[in-house]
Amino acid sequence: MNYSLAIHGGAGTILRSSMTPEKEQAYHLALRESLIAGENILAKGGSALDAVTASIVSLENCPLFNAGLGSVYTNEGKHEMDASIMEGSLLEAGAVSMLKNIKNPILLAKTILEKSEHVFLCGEGAETFARDNGLNFEPDEYFNTLFRKEQWLQALNEDQILLDHNGLNEKKFGTVGAVAKDRNGNLAAGTSTGGMTNKKFNRIGDSPIIGAGTYANNNTCAISCTGHGEYFIRGVVAYDVSCLMEYKGLSLKEACEVVILDKQVRLGGEGGLIGVNKMGDVALVFNSEGMYRGCIKEGEGLETKIYK
Ligand code: ASP
């Protein structure tokens, strides 16, 4: 059986006109590195779960995306990260939210999936679990990137809570995610984010919520979302795609298009998702101007894209 892998680095108002060739190249390179990190595992017969984790770790360690190192600032000038991961054979899952100082939130979500009797941990409790399990912590300064600080100061000045933006009238969602099918036919999905710039009240988006931002089931699909989290939670987006396939017999592509191009548009939710099914077909669907994305299928070339 052939493997497939797809990744995203967020959707939103990503316009050619506001991009320099150097920046564009940096994004393509980072997406490529992430795909290669995941593919190295799949090509050796490794699991979809490990591949998804490796691809996301690579994106979390890159300052270009709103996850891990490049996470946006909260209203208090801190970083609060959310992540989740799920595998499609036993429907096992791990999720974390409101994390501070954890270098790779996706590794903590995976450790919960593998070692905890629970699915969803948050805040200080999740950090204690991380410490007990030897995960890497970083000081506040590690997450203090200049680009994000400028975004936050601008948002603070305007008293706005913004989705990872690059201009006051532009929305950009820099969350990262990956979905994969391995050679044994197992599916997995994962998502990791810093959430919204200038967020208050321990706001949590869709990314750590199983069924909203992330879902995997070997019988249907594996999905990772990016977009305006409030709408994606209300649309139970990732599970809705799976349900349309399971109960209505839609193909992966049809189900993704119904959810993102019709239902989310009617609800007002901007964003997109990536999906893979048990045949290894890949879907990369978004209703925004662009989505940082890429995919690779065994025996076919690697592809990375930004715009429509
Ligand atoms: N969905 C994420 C959230 O609402 C944002 C993103 O996709 O960048 O937290």
Image (spheres, helix red, strand yellow):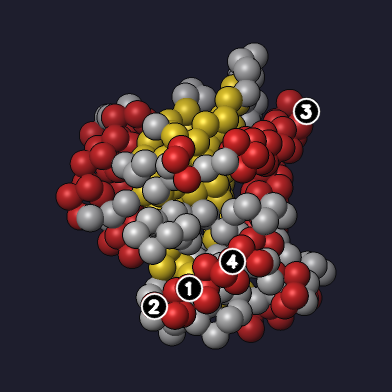
Q: Would residue 46 be found to the left or right of residue 119 on screen?
A: right
The residue under label 2 is 158
**Disc ID at residue 154:** 1
Q: CA distance from mark 4 to mark 3?
A: 37 Å
Question: What secondary structure is found at the residue carrying circle 2?
Answer: helix
- Which label lies toward us, 4 or 1? 1
Q: Is residue 287 visible?
A: yes
Q: Earlier in the sequence, mark 4 or mark 2?
A: 4
- Which label lies toward us, 4 or 2? 2
**Disc ID at residue 44:** 3
Pointers 2 and 1 in contact (C-beta within 8 Å)? yes
Pointers 1 and 3 in contact (C-beta within 8 Å)? no
- Which label lies toward us, 3 or 2? 2
Q: Quadrant of residue 117?
A: bottom right
Query: Residue 129, image x and y in percent?
Result: 70, 75
Q: Residues within 10 Å of mark 3 (few under 14, many from 20)?
A: few
Q: Residues within 10 Å of mark 1 (few under 14, many from 20)?
A: some
Q: Earlier in the sequence, mark 4 or mark 1?
A: 4
Query: Residue 69, image x and y in percent?
Result: 69, 62
